[in-house]
Amino acid sequence: MSIKLPARANKSQWLKIGFCILGVLMIAGAVTYEVLTRQASTVSTVSAMSTTADIAKDRRSLGRLDGLNWVNEVNAKFADKDFLFVMLPGNDDLTQKMEQTVSSSTEKMAQDGVSVSVYSLDTTDPELTLTAKRLSITDLPTVLLFSSKGRGAIISGDITEKKILEAYFTLQQICIPSNSGCCPK
């Protein structure tokens, strides 16, 4: 069976076909743009950092921390952990609240079988100021989060368990239902 096309299609038929094709291309472009920007906005919430096994070698983000003693200590002690918190303390009240929040978060993560460690810099440690300066952190206390999957995040200001767990899920690339449509239905 063969399809016979008219010998000459008139101008209005070609215009209709052209507009139809243009419409399909515009819809495909809009969908592609939406998917790419949604993925980019999700990823941009987390800084690309390196693994807990060797956080100082990522030149793009944490290379600025080369030569700091705490980085070398973390590399040596926590190489076998799934997740690492590094606490940068601020004033006493906020630091105490941060420590309690990190503690409750790590307990929840450990209940899920995640190997978690916490490392804290001392308020008198000169590397605290140097670390904050190199990472452009102006609001202390702050928590640095490192995943063994090669990602990291910085949480400053109001440090809540919700923010920590959201960062954890994002760093581990665990699906969060109703968040950016990442989960299959």
Image: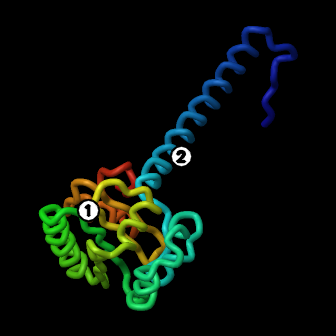
Residue beneath the point at 37% across and 73% down = 126
Looking at the picture, which amino acid does disc 2 mark?
Leu
Residue beneath the point at 25% across and 68% down = 89
C-alpha gap between disc 1 and disc 2:
34 Å
In the displayed structure, would residue 114 be above or below residue 128? Answer: below
Q: Quadrant of the N terminus?
A: top right
Q: Which residue is tagged 2?
A: 36
Which SS class for mark 2? helix
Q: Is residue 151 left or right of residue 142?
A: right
Counting residues from the N terminus, which is met first, the one under dot 1 or under dot 2?
A: 2
Q: Nearer the viewer, residue 171 or 14?
A: 171
Q: In x, y percent, where is residue 171?
A: 40, 66
Q: Residues within 10 Å of mark 2 (few under 14, many from 20)?
A: few
Q: Is residue 15 left or right of residue 29?
A: right
Q: Is residue 89 left or right of residue 173?
A: left
Q: How many marks?
A: 2
| Residue 109 falls in image quadrant | bottom left
Q: In x, y percent, where is residue 141?
A: 26, 62
Q: Which residue is tagged 1?
A: 141
In the displayed structure, would residue 61 be above or below residue 149? Answer: above
Q: Is residue 169 left or right of residue 55?
A: left
Foreground disc of the pair 1, 2: 1
Residue beneath the point at 33% across and 74% down = 86
Residue beneath the point at 40% across and 81% down = 70
